[in-house]
Image (cartoon, coloured by chain):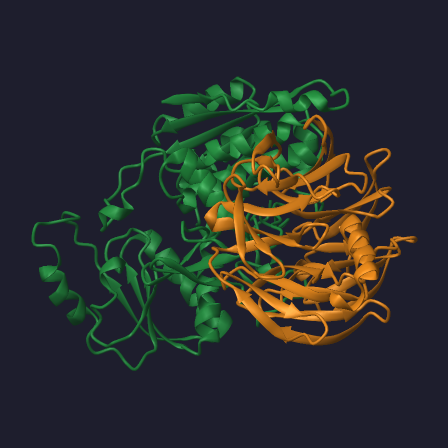
Chain colours: A green, B orange
């Protein structure tokens, strides 16, 4: 499935009053979402919309086009929904058509595969995969990450728990490899910020249907038993990237303790409740165009498009080489409703960004917490810092 | 603003002691406007009945107070003497900031959700024009001669110069990230544009529409990313400009002749917008996170006192009223 988004300056008339424009520059971007079969989310409220991520890219393209209309720049985005089997051919087709900016919404393995195919022909923006390995051993020179890393999100939560003095933690991880990778990130964050993991348990995924007609009846008995007999603790952290059990933990734990991580107090790059720092403007603009609330995938795709648009603005219509160098230089910054400028880490291509801590219908806090300082950028208290990186690109 | 000041200064002279200065502060979260007696700094009234008031300004004669009631999607108008609410003005959706023509009419309003600037006749209450601008219009300034109104768009990162007779954009100047506020010098030769995320103030030569200098800020012990320029005001004599630096809790003082920063004044938390007293002797700052305003003596650049107002004060305007 492929769709051409013609958000080419509907405001073209605005350029009329301008001094003579340089010849028009067109920026062509591909957004590729790779849908792999997976389990359904526990709650139907979390079912993915058809245009997940793509709607954010559309808004980013429209925002870029409005700005571009003042500068003689137009933006065309082609969105592609592929499977792990078809995506390589799709990317090849796009590269052959001369596209040099590719935004991916794919898992880590597919993302790195696409980055390798793109090679020096295109800059790839990872707008979905949070895996730390993508920023570490599997990093690539042409791969930038607008999605935050697992380490950034687990550090964000750990800072808050340390600030709250909830330093005795039970870690419950799912049985899938991605759950275990997330649990490893929580262990690292706990050590970094002085939390003590008093016990770990693994929640085995035994399969079965996401929903049944009896709903909560068995869960209400299973979850308390599963969390019985834990040592004294302040909080339960769930590492459940597969989305198998965490949503069932709050109010079902044996001890009356709050839940954080994959449920309860959740670290996220974005949430439709976010209103600070002009965030309402993004929300209303997105909702007007997509007719639904924005999810992190949408925000991340929007950021990827805005990175490209911002570089096009600042380089005054620069070509691929100029854009590439500018985005990776210390002159680049992005405003993205997070209260401060966002920049790329030169050691692993990760976009620095504050992380929201979301509790139900509100943004309860935003990390980094004020108390955690850093000699370069406070944002580098989140995630893998320069001395720790395993990226050798 | 300068023209407003001049008009007020004249009327002060004519009317003598019958006039009292009042400070009006919009409280974004408090859904109210706090009114203070400028001489005693006592709260003398609180105007209620508005949702998310942000931008606030006054008619040149000081009689009318205009408030952007963002969540009401209109501009509310109040009598500055009686606090009576007068008929509202249409504003377009989510008005945040606006500027009055130096003559007192019309009003130019930034609609941040709709990428337009709405022009409203304050007498007939009719929308005269809607001017498409960049993404998320915010800051509004008007040249002292009233010929150009400037709008800053926060995501497009430009200052758009709009001809007030034709409503056409005549120039666009690219500035740094998230431009928030635009203010001319009284002679109209320079335009200051603050960039909150970029952390700079661009100084634009209005004859060429070129940026002649970008001011950056540095305060020992304050993280660079917390130095976020927002509101800016220039003194009536054009000698000094004051810039609110948001979460840095400071107001920077700019020597306009040399375009250099001469001082940083510690005020309340998340300092947002600024407004002069009618005689220009004091500058009031709204401190959004400490729920107060700070008072700066503009002769000595000393912060003399802070006064509690409503919840999350946003904008401020001071007028001389009967």
Q: Nearer the viewer, residue A2 or B225?
A: B225
Query: Can residue A138 be seen by looking at this rendering?
Result: no
Name which residue lies at 8% across and 50% down.
A213
Name which residue lies at 69% across and 37% down.
A325
How far across and how far down the image is residue B192, in percent? 78, 47
Above-or-below relation of B276 to A323 = below
The tally of labels here is 0
Image quarter of residue A166: bottom left
Q: Nearer the viewer, residue B322 or B68?
A: B322
Q: Quadrant of the C terminus of chain B?
A: bottom right
Image quarter of residue B206: top right
- As drawn, which residue projects farthest toward the left? A214
Image quarter of residue A314: top right
How far across and how far down the image is residue A82, in percent? 36, 28
Q: Is residue A241 left or right of residue A121?
A: left
- As drawn, which residue projects farthest toward the bottom? A232
How far across and how far down the image is residue B241, in percent? 81, 56
Q: Is residue B162 left or right of residue B69?
A: right
Q: Nearer the viewer, residue B62 or A378?
A: B62
Q: Nearer the viewer, residue A159 or A109?
A: A159
Query: Can residue B17 be seen by looking at this rendering?
Result: yes
């Amino acid at each position: 499935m492929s769709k051409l988004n013609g958000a080419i300056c509907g405001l073209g008339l605005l350029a009329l009053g301008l001094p003579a424009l340089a010849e028009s520059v067109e920026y062509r971007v591909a957004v590729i979402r790779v849908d792999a079969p997976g389990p359904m989310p526990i709650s139907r409220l979390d079912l993915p919309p058809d245009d997940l991520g793509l709607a954010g890219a559309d808004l980013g393209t429209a925002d870029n086009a409005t700005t571009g209309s003042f500068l003689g720049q137009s933006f065309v985005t082609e969105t592609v929904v592929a499977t792990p089997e078809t995506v390589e051919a799709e990317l090849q087709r796009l590269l052959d058509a001369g596209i040099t900016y590719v935004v991916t919404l794919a898992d880590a393995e597919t993302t790195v595969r696409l980055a390798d195919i793109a090679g020096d022909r295109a800059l790839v923006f990872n707008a979905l995969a949070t895996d730390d390995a993508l920023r570490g051993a599997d990093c690539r020179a042409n791969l930038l990450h607008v999605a935050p890393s697992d380490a950034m999100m687990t550090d964000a939560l750990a800072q808050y728990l340390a600030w709250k003095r909830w330093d005795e933690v039970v870690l419950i991880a799912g049985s899938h490899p991605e759950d275990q990778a997330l649990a490893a990130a929580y262990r690292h964050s706990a050590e970094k910020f002085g939390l003590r993991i008093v016990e770990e348990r693994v929640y085995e995924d035994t399969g079965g249907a996401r929903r049944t007609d009896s709903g909560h009846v068995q869960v209400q008995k299973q979850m308390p038993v599963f969390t019985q007999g834990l040592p004294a603790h302040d909080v339960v952290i769930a590492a459940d990237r597969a989305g198998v059990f965490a949503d069932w933990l709050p109010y079902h734990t044996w001890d009356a303790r709050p839940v954080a991580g994959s449920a309860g107090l959740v670290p996220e790059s974005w949430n439709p409740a976010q209103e600070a720092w002009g965030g309402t403007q993004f929300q209303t603009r997105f909702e007007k165009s997509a007719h639904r609330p924005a999810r992190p995938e949408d925000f991340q795709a929007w950021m990827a498009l805005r990175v490209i648009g911002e570089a096009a603005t600042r380089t005054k219509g620069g070509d691929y080489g100029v854009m590439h160098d500018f985005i990776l230089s210390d002159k680049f910054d992005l405003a993205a409703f997070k209260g401060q400028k966002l920049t790329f880490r030169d050691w692993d291509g990760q976009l620095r960004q504050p992380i929201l801590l979301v509790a139900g219908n509100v943004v309860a806090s935003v990390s980094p917490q004020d108390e955690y300082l850093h000699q370069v950028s406070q944002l580098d208290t989140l995630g893998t810092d320069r001395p720790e990186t395993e990226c050798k690109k | 603003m300068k023209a407003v000041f001049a008009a007020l200064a004249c009327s002060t002279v004519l009317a003598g002691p019958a006039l009292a200065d009042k400070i009006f502060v919009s409280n974004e979260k408090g859904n109210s406007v706090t009114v203070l007696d400028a001489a005693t700094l006592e709260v003398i009234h609180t105007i209620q009945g508005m949702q998310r008031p942000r931008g606030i300004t006054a008619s040149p004669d000081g009689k009318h107070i205009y408030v952007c009631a963002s969540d009401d999607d209109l501009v509310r108008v109040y009598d500055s003497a009686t606090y009576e609410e007068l008929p509202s003005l249409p504003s377009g959706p989510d008005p945040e900031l606006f500027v009055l023509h130096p003559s007192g009419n019309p009003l130019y309003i930034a609609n941040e959700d709709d990428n337009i600037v709405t022009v409203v006749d304050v007498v007939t209450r009719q929308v005269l024009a809607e001017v498409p601008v960049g993404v998320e219009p915010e800051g509004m300034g008007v040249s002292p001669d009233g010929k150009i109104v400037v709008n800053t768009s926060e995501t497009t990162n430009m200052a758009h110069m709009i001809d007030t007779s034709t409503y056409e954009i005549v120039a666009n100047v690219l500035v740094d990230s998230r431009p928030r506020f635009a203010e001319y010098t009284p002679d109209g030769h320079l335009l200051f544009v603050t960039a909150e995320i970029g952390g700079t103030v661009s100084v634009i030569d209005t004859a060429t529409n070129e940026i002649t200098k970008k001011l950056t800020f540095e305060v020992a012990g304050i993280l660079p990313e917390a130095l976020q320029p927002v509101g800016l005001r220039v003194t009536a004599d054009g000698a000094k400009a004051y810039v609110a630096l948001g979460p840095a809790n400071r107001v920077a003082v700019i020597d306009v002749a040399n375009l250099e920063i001469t001082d940083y004044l510690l005020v309340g938390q998340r300092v947002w917008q600024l407004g002069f007293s009618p005689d220009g002797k004091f500058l009031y700052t709204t401190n959004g996170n400490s729920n107060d305003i700070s008072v700066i003596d503009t002769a000595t650049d000393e912060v003399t006192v802070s006064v509690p107002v409503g919840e999350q004060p946003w904008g401020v305007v001071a007028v001389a009223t009967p």
